[in-house]
Image (tube, grey):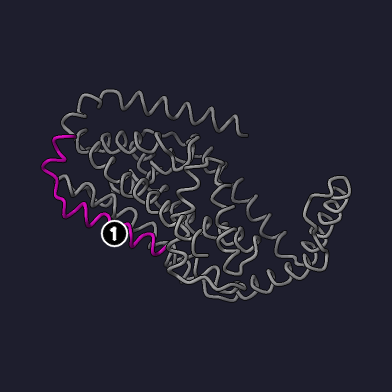
Amino acid sequence: MTWLRRVLAVAAFAVVLYLFWPLIGQLRDAVHLFREANWGWMAAAAVIHLGSYSFLAALNYLLLRPFRGHATFWQLMAILPAMAFVEVALPSAGASGLVLRARLLGRLGYSPEVSSFTLLLETLYLFAMMVGVSVSGLWYLLHSGEMKLSQLAFLVGLAALIVGAALAAFVAGRDRERALRWTLALVARWDNLKARFPKLPSRSPEAVTARLHNFYDGLGELGETPRWPFLTTAFGRVALDVATLGACFAAFHHPVSVGVLLTGYGLTLLLSAMAALPGGMGLADASLVVIYARLGAPGAVAIAAALTYRLIAFWLLRFVGFVSWQVQEARL
């Protein structure tokens, strides 16, 4: 499937680049717009995005709270940007960020399985909120006649397969005894491998069983927690991210309607998901410009607003993440 994703990424980038090419002549006008920009709105965009990230930290705090460990909200505010930086510095389809998350949360008392599972839940909650935004973009394409019903049916079918696979994995994982049998079978195979490679670390069945029971105890407590705090924090994360983009347009004296803002944001998410590089680098930047230009924003404004948004939401966050990572390595 990796080759298929790369093919789709190249194809999507080629299409976006083709649509972006006529706007290149407006780059000079975009530079002039920065001289006349409302810097108050730019500062507001940075503050709004900080609020968006605080909701993400709150979501992780709520997800981690039932499990053994002692991460504070502020520690998570430092860990999450560090993950974002590492995922770009060491591109690995998110694996580098997951490893750093497990490393830093491990120092705070969380097991690797808790770290991975809560990251999965965070992704699912955010995905649910982003789907709503993306659907608005699909509806716009369908309503405007740019998407056929057959294409929409294909996307819905593909989404159903993905959701079905995730639900099947979730249902299988809920059975503690089955998970324990599978885990002990893996430990037995690991022991066989260790007999051939003595330098591999040991995995005691008793220790693994105890960790698994601790994980399921926390999972049971998490299952009894009301869902609305998780949904609220996930919604806050996405809503304020959209508001950040809106503030970037306002900074260049061209505010856009909520409908256009949501449509463009959703369509950009769909295209960025196919990007081969982390964070949708390249494809997300160009698609933001193309989509909003086609939705009615002047080309120069779309370029300036997209660059500002990506600078705040992507690059500034990862610069903070680099600093945060170094500080945490020294302290934790």
Q: Looking at the picture, does residue 206 appear above or below residue 123?
A: below
Q: Looking at the picture, does residue 303 appear above or below residue 60?
A: above
Viewer-closest of 87 and 237 = 87
Going 80% across and 49% down the picture, which residue do you hit?
199
Going 33% across and 26% down the picture, which residue do you hit?
19
Q: Looking at the picture, does residue 205 appear above or below residue 250?
A: below
Q: Secondary structure under badge 1?
A: helix
Quadrant of the image containing the N terminus: top right
Viewer-closest of 316 and 307 = 316
Based on the displayed image, in which of its 4 quarters is residue 65 positioned?
bottom right
Going 81% across and 54% down the picture, which residue do you hit?
186
Q: Extreme front residue here?
A: 330
Q: Is residue 74 magenta?
A: no
Going 85% across and 51% down the picture, which residue do you hit?
189
Residue 302 screen position, x and y as percent: 24, 38
Residue 253 screen position, x and y as percent: 14, 46
Residue 301 screen position, x and y as percent: 20, 38
Q: Extreme left residue here?
A: 36
Question: Chief secondary structure of the magenta span?
Answer: helix
The mark tally for this picture is 1
The region drawn magenta spans 31-55
Residue 48 screen position, x and y as percent: 29, 59
Residue at image mark 1: 48
How packed mark 1 is, by other alpha carbons closer than 10 Å (few <14, some 14-19, many 20 or more), is: many
Q: Is residue 49 magenta?
A: yes
The amino acid at mark 1 is Ile
Left or right of 149 in this view: 247: left
